[in-house]
Image: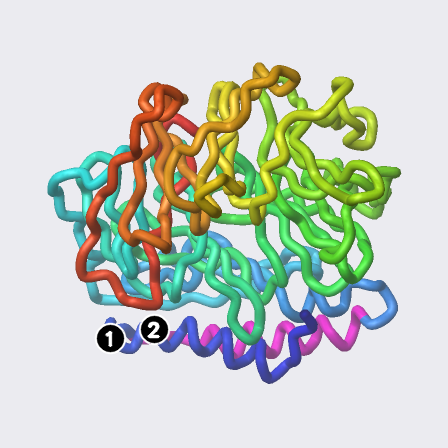
Amino acid sequence: MKVEQDGLERAVREVLSRQAGTPHRLIRDPADVVIRRANRIRRRRTVTGISLAATAIIAVTAGAFQFGQEPPRNGSTIAIGEGDHPSGVTWTSTVAPPRPDTGTPLAGVDLVLGQTIATAQGGRVTVVGAGRIERAHRLSDGRGWLAVSAPVTAGRFLWEVSPAGTVQVLLAGADEIVLDAHGHHIAWKQGEVLASARVVNGALTSISRAKVPAKASPIRFVGDAVLVRLAPDRPGHTLWRLHSGAFHPGTDQSTHRVFGALPDGRVVGEVVTGASKATCLTLLDPARDLAPARPGCGPRLGGDGSGSVSPDGRWLLANGRSKDGDKALLVDLTALDKAAGPVVAGPAISGAVAWSSPGTAYYHAETVGGLTRVDIDRAVTGGSPSRVELTALPADQPPVVVSGSGGDR
């Protein structure tokens, strides 16, 4: 998706306008600074192949655009693609940040419930200054969460949300954003530029970039590499090793979907087989362009690709077809070459899956509402999942399970 200049300006101003309910005094207008800076970048980058990325994507260092919280005096904005030099924007606020409330845990993982994060420890954190959150990851160092926005006209945003609920913009205007399993690395795509960076103390550092096909899109991290789907309308993935300027499409033309990786690095995915183009589950070797790591093929799921591998690599919980329609299926990854088929674990998955332990998973199921909790030991013996009721949620904002907040971190 190409982002027009007017769309970028609207998106930047939309985020800043969320401060309206929080009185403060701006020394300079950050939106004007960002937009002027982006305009300069676009004019200078037309021959480098990264003009659109430099125009549309904005990173913000610690202290900039923190809503409702006084930042350090030297807070500054950074425009990715312009040497990552600060522009010197500073501002002050007189309003103290909100304090999290403590209550009864709703689940064994954190949940995003509209503009509130309900933690697995029973905390309630009101998020101040962010839009709709589509995905989130809890940071292991206690700094809060990374949150990826739902797409808007100018693309996606990446926010860092503090434990007090204040928001810092790290990235804006990307076509797609993915996070690694620890919240230490991010990758994003804008136009024909794929980029990655480390997240260090609320800032993006060690940025790498590569030119990729326009239809390519980052899907997830696999170890220290980014899995990239080469086109949305055909099988085929490759791994980008985060080397600047180097992107090799590889030879894979059969991988249809990827669900995650095992602790030994092998990738769990579906491949297209035979003239019928049917898919089956197998393990893939990242060192051999995602070629099957073992002979034969496992079960045929036939789902939409939603699913996740357990932290110990033993189980896959993913959507698939059963005799009763679309369901969440549980697959023993140690027995892919045996006759035992998938077990129905619950209603179909909507969105992400988060594990509170290697034996317990949570996800939102749109067909039944609320939150579904799958206990692996119960599921393999034919037991039903349990359901967590969630009330007072906006109709257009389903709950979001937070990765890294339980046993998957």
Nearer the observer, 366 or 113: 366
| Residue at the image position 68 percent from the left and 40 percent from the top | 226
Q: Answer few, some or many: residues within 10 Å of disc 2's Cα (few below 14, many 20 plus, some between 14 and 19).
A: some
Q: Are marks 2 and 1 in contact (CB under 8 Å)?
A: yes
Q: Main secondary structure of the magenta part?
A: helix
Q: Answer few, some or many: residues within 10 Å of disc 1's Cα (few below 14, many 20 plus, some between 14 and 19).
A: few
Position in image of residue 374 (x %, y %): 34, 32
Q: Answer yes or no: is residue 148 visible.
A: yes
Position in image of residue 36 (x %, y %): 61, 78
Residue under numbered circle 1? 21
- In the rendering, which numbered label is found on residue 18? 2
Q: Amino acid at mark 2?
A: Arg
Q: How many marks?
A: 2
Q: Which residues are magenta?
A: 25-45
Residue 37 magenta-highlighted: yes
| Residue at the image position 44 percent from the left and 61 percent from the top | 64
Secondary structure, mark 1, is helix
- In this picture, residue 365 sits left or right of residue 106: right
Q: Quadrant of the N terminus?
A: bottom right
Question: Image height check: is 54 above or below 294?
Answer: below
Furthest toward the bottom, the residue is: 6
Position in image of residue 145 (x %, y %): 38, 45
Q: Quadrant of residue 224?
A: top right
Q: Amino acid at mark 1?
A: Gly
